[in-house]
Image (tube, rainbow, N blue to C red):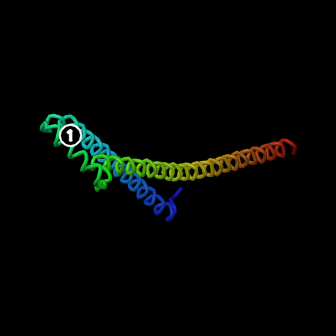
């Protein structure tokens, strides 16, 4: 039972595929951890900003506040959103893309491992069939030897 040259190439391919799967899973895990950490830090910074906002504002006289409100009503809004809300939206989109990417990688990984498992099972089944054929051939040879021995024994006592 010697290995064929193609078996060595197949083994090296399998080990190469193992390392690529492992590397891919490591990279995805690190990326997910970085995204979650960034999201957590942003939410903490935003909540700290919201908590400290009332204490930072200086109380202004009522006239100044009314004038500012009138000016704000006449001005067109220059800022679409605050940076924290914009960052949150981008993080949500990034998280969605990451989840979709993980889903696709998971499906690819499942099919890759499934194909490898099916290939191994087929090889195992073929080896089992070959072994059974050898056992039946040996059993047939032993039975044939017994028949020849009985034929010689019968012919010896017959004369």
Q: Is residue 67 left or right of residue 148?
A: left
Q: Is residue 56 visible?
A: no
Depth check: give the residue in front, 23 or 101.
101
How many labels, in total? Answer: 1
Residue 58 at x, y percent in the picture: 12, 38
Depth check: give the residue in front, 155 or 27.
27
Quarter occupied by residue 66? top left
Query: Relative to 27, is 157 above or below?
Result: above
Q: Is residue 2 visible?
A: yes
What residue sits right under mark 1 in the picture?
49
How crowded is the residue under tag 1: few (<14 C-alpha within 10 Å), some, or many (20+)? few
Residue visible at 76% across and 45% down in the picture: 149
Residue 102 at x, y percent in the picture: 44, 49
Depth check: give the residue in front, 146 or 99.
99
Q: Is residue 104 left or right of residue 67?
A: right
Residue visible at 81% across and 46% down in the picture: 151
Residue 51 at x, y percent in the picture: 21, 34
Residue 17 at x, y percent in the picture: 43, 57
Under circle 1, the secondary element is helix
Residue visible at 83% across and 43% down in the picture: 154
The N terminus appears in which quarter of the rendering? bottom right
Query: Relative to 150, is 79 above or below?
Result: below
Residue visible at 39% across and 56% down in the picture: 20
Q: Residue furthest right?
A: 158
The C terminus appears in which quarter of the rendering? top right
């Amino acid at each position: 039972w010697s290995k064929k040259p193609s078996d060595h190439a197949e083994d090296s391919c399998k080990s190469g595929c193992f390392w690529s799967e492992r590397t891919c899973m490591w990279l995805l895990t690190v990326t997910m951890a970085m995204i979650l950490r960034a999201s957590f830090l942003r939410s903490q910074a935003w909540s700290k900003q919201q908590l400290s906002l009332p204490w930072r504002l200086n109380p202004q006289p009522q006239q100044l506040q009314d004038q500012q409100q009138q000016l704000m009503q006449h001005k067109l809004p220059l800022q679409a959103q605050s940076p924290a809300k914009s960052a949150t939206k981008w993080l949500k989109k990034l998280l969605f893309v990451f989840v979709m990417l993980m889903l696709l990688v998971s499906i690819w990984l499942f099919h890759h491992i499934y194909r490898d498992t099916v290939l191994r099972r087929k090889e195992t089944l073929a080896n089992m069939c070959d072994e059974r054929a050898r056992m039946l051939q040996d059993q047939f040879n032993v039975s044939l030897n017994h028949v020849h021995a009985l034929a010689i024994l019968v012919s010896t006592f017959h004369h």
